[in-house]
Amino acid sequence: MTGEINFFGAYFAPFVSDLAVAFVLFLPMRWLCARAGLFAPFWHPALVELCLFVVVLALTVYLL
C-alpha cells in the first residue's frame, strides 16, 4: 500500500489514482460495448455502464 499522493500541494488518497486508472480503462470498453450494441437489451443502459465501471474499478484495486 502506498501513502498519500501529492498533486501540486494537494494530498489525495491512493484510491483516487485507482479511480483515474479505472476511468481511463472504462472509456474504451464503454465505447466498444455501445458500438457492438451490448447495452440495447437492457432496460437501463446507464445502470449497466455503472456496473461495468464498478467491475473495472474492482479489478484495478485488486491488481494495483
Image (spheres, rainbow, N blue to C red):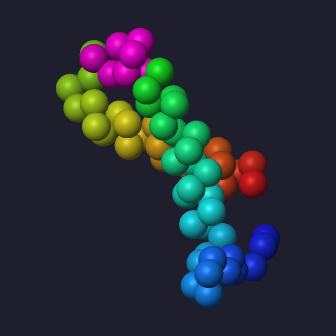
* Residue 38 lies in the magenta stretch: yes
Nearer to me, 63 or 30: 30
Q: Is residue 25 above or below residue 19?
A: above
Asked if one can make out residue 58 in the rendered structure from this viewpoint, the answer is no
Location of the N terminus by quadrant is: bottom right
Q: Quadrant of residue 48?
A: top left
In the rendered structure, the answer to whether residue 20 lies left or right of residue 31 reads right
Nearer to me, 58 or 15: 15
Q: Which residues, given as a range, are shown in magenta?
A: 33-40
Picture residue at 57% right of the left edge, 66% below the top: 16
Image coords of residue 34 (percent x, y): 37, 21
Picture residue at 37% right of the left edge, 36% below the top: 49
Nearer to me, 34 or 47: 34
In the rendered structure, the answer to whether residue 25 lies left or right of residue 42 reads right
Picture residue at 27% right of the left edge, 17% below the top: 40
Q: Is residue 59 above or below residue 6?
A: above
Picture residue at 55% right of the left edge, 57% below the top: 19
| The residue positioned farthest toward the right in the image shown | 1
Q: Quadrant of residue 24?
A: top right
In the rendered structure, the answer to whether residue 50 lies left or right of residue 22 reads left
Q: Quadrant of residue 41?
A: top left
| The residue positioned farthest toward the bottom in the image shown | 9
Image coords of residue 57 (percent x, y): 56, 49
